[in-house]
């Protein structure tokens, strides 16, 4: 009996040593991490956010100890509601939303900790090809626009004003159609022009019912279009989690900076099963060539000031809010320096 027990102990010790040398004896010979579940509510599920999907598909969140639960809110108002209610830990949306709620929730306001896109991601689509399109061509037309107070609509109006057009008198902008339904409405015959995100713009082109004539991202310049944010209390209570989340995103940013549109499209294709690879590649190339994604996630003060300028011009800013309150660069800076 003692001899058998000695053999069992020896075998146990041997297995333990082997497992340690192989970094554990979890599934497939790897040690299973204790992952922390994080619910991320994104404003839309779009190829515009390619670095995020690269981070998901390449396993960067798992590397940082995060089990990511991705939920699509279909609108910044819905995403913000999910964050404020605690339904989501982190929100991904236009940072104008954090400005809107700042005065309404002073005890635990929303803080932006990472900026993903630096250009608008939508395009102006016309019914016919217009090789020499000028923004003045919109005068007297009907346009399917975005929700009042949302970044897509405000950036559109910002461009119109830069081109000496009055959004209220020089054209008819229909803002009554739900986010994500404008392409279908345009295909059905509504409007002379429509402002579309991808894959809506490419889908309209492929169907032969619309043609991209301008990029709002190019014509508006560098704008802090989308950012990651969370309640002040959540960030204070979970700094390591926020840092790991930001590290994973930075790895995704690094990937898109160092790979071709074709390679990026291959990686994120599982996120867009309803879109064929050729269309995904076309869309990624559009965003890639117009310098949509930042090299890092740092939300600079100049960008925040520009955002408030756009809100002010759109008549959506009651008062200026402090950059230091609504933005922290601590996590993005560490991720960039790692």
Image: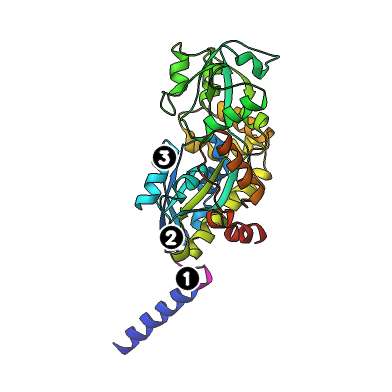
Secondary structure under the numbered disc 1 in the rendered image? helix
Q: Is residue 245 magenta?
A: no
Range of residues picked out in magenta: 20-26
Q: Nearer the viewer, mark 1 or mark 3?
A: 3
Residue 87 picture location, percent across and down: 35, 50
Q: Nearer the viewer, mark 2 or mark 1?
A: 2
Q: Nearer the viewer, residue 261 or 219?
A: 219
Secondary structure under the numbered disc 2 in the rendered image? helix
The residue that disc 2 covers is 234
The residue that disc 1 covers is 19
Residue 24 picture location, percent across and down: 47, 68
> Quarter holding the N terminus?
bottom left
Local packing at callout 3 (Cα closer than 10 Å; few below 14, some 14-19, many 20+) is some
Label drawn at residue 169: none
The residue that disc 3 covers is 77
Name the chief secondary structure element in magenta.
loop
Residue extending farthest bottom: 2
Secondary structure under the numbered disc 3 in the rendered image? helix
Q: Nearer the viewer, residue 151 or 105?
A: 105
Q: Is residue 35 left or right of residue 2?
A: right
Which of the two discs, 2 and 1, labels the residue nearer the N terminus?
1
Q: Is residue 24 left or right of residue 267?
A: left
Which of the two discs, 2 and 3, labels the residue nearer the N terminus?
3
Asked if labels 1 and 2 touch by Cβ distance under 8 angstroms, the answer is no
Q: CA distance from mark 2 to mark 1?
A: 37 Å
Q: CA distance from mark 2 to mark 3?
A: 20 Å
């Amino acid at each position: 009996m003692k001899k058998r027990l000695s053999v069992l102990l020896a075998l146990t010790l041997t297995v333990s040593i082997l497992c340690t040398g192989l970094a554990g004896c979890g599934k497939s010979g790897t040690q299973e991490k204790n992952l922390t579940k994080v619910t991320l509510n994104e404003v839309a599920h779009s190829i515009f956010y390619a670095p995020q999907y690269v981070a998901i598909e390449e396993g960067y969140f798992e590397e940082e100890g995060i089990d990511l639960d991705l939920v699509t809110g279909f609108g910044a108002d819905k995403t913000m509601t999910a964050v404020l209610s605690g339904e989501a830990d982190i929100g991904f949306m236009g940072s104008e939303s954090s400005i809107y709620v700042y005065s309404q929730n002073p005890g635990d306001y929303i803080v932006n900790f990472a900026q993903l896109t630096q250009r608008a991601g939508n395009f102006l689509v016309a019914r016919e090809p217009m090789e020499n399109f000028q923004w003045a061509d919109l005068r007297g037309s009907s346009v399917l626009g975005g929700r009042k107070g949302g970044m897509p609509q405000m950036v559109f109006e910002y461009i119109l004003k830069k081109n000496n057009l009055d959004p209220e008198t020089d054209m008819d902008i229909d803002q009554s159609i739900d986010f994500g339904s404008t392409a279908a409405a345009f295909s059905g015959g509504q409007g002379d022009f429509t402002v579309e995100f991808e894959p809506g713009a490419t889908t309209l082109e492929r169907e032969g019912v619309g043609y991209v004539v301008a990029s709002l991202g190019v014509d508006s310049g560098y704008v802090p279009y989308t950012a990651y944010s969370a309640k002040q209390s959540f960030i204070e209570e979970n700094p390591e989690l926020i840092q790991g989340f930001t590290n994973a995103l930075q790895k995704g940013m690094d990937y898109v900076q160092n790979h071709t549109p074709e390679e990026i499209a291959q990686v994120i294709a599982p996120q867009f099963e309803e879109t064929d690879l050729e269309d995904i590649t076309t869309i990624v190339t559009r965003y890639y060539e117009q310098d949509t994604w930042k090299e890092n996630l740092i939300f600079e003060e100049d960008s925040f000031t520009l955002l408030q300028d756009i809100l002010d011009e759109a008549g959506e800013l009651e008062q200026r809010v402090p950059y230091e309150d609504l933005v922290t660069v601590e996590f993005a800076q560490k991720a960039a320096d790692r």
